[in-house]
Amino acid sequence: MTAPDSVLEFAAHVRVALGGGPFPPTGGWAHMGVVLCDAVVQSGLRCEAVVRPRTRDLQAAWPDADTVTGFRARPATEDLGTALRLANARKPATITALAEHLALAGVDTRDHLRAWLEEEAHRSGVRAVHGIGPKTVDYLGSLVGRSGVAVDVHLRAFARGAGVEVTGYVQLREVYEEAADSLRHVNPDGREFKATP
């Protein structure tokens, strides 16, 4: 929990910098192949210039990969790295391992993944997949419409500009989530935003 004064100061900075909202929620993706690929590929790459065109192309080329089951069957006919235009094998291996993890947990659809990620044990368990850290887990949730904050370099820079001195990932995420609570922002299903447990 962050000091209430710090959260209120940060919320005031957000209000000045971005306005009072309401801000339209992102709906995320319905296609599970795209969800898995976007969650992993985004690390270190520019979203709109690099990641979005590749995930849109994958969705068009692999329409049958809209569930985890369909996605897992697809690399038998086409190489994932080639489909995503990735030069190294690390990210495709992480995507494949993430799909395997979810399949073993019985997760197949966007709605199931969204509900499944509500459990802290499940979010922690996903981090056992090599290459998946706390930001990727949070981002994975946002891709399926779960409220939360995936702290990236842009959010870190914004917080520094606001004078927030917190540097740890979890603590900085809490600052953002508590500020959203204080600003009474709502998540995609219309409920008031609540910080991640």
Image (cartoon, rainbow, N blue to C red):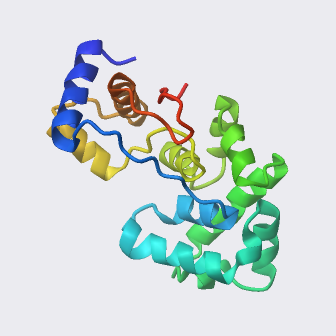
Q: On the rendered structure, is 39 left or right of 52?
A: right
On the image, the x and y values in percent for residue 133 come to: 53, 47
Which residue corresponds to the image point at 36% horizontal and 44% vertical from the top-left? 23
Q: On the rendered structure, is 143 left or right of 164?
A: right
Q: Does any portion of residue 45 appear in the rendered image?
A: no
Give the camera-side residue of 87 and 164: 164
On the image, the x and y values in percent for residue 44 come to: 40, 63
Which residue corresponds to the image point at 77% horizontal and 77% vertical from the top-left? 74
* Position above or below: 53 against 160: below
* Position above or below: 49 against 130: below
Which residue corresponds to the image point at 24% horizontal and 20% vertical from the top-left? 8
On the image, the x and y values in percent for residue 66 come to: 73, 66
**How many numbered marks are there?**
0
Q: On the rendered structure, is 4 left or right of 79?
A: left
Q: Does any portion of residue 24 appear in the rendered image?
A: yes
Which residue corresponds to the image point at 77% horizontal and 74% vertical from the top-left? 64
On the image, the x and y values in percent for residue 71 come to: 75, 69
Q: Quadrant of the N terminus?
A: top left
Give the camera-side residue of 176 and 92: 176
Q: Residue furthest top?
A: 4
Q: Quadrant of the C terminus?
A: top right
Q: On the rendered structure, is 139 left or right of 46?
A: right
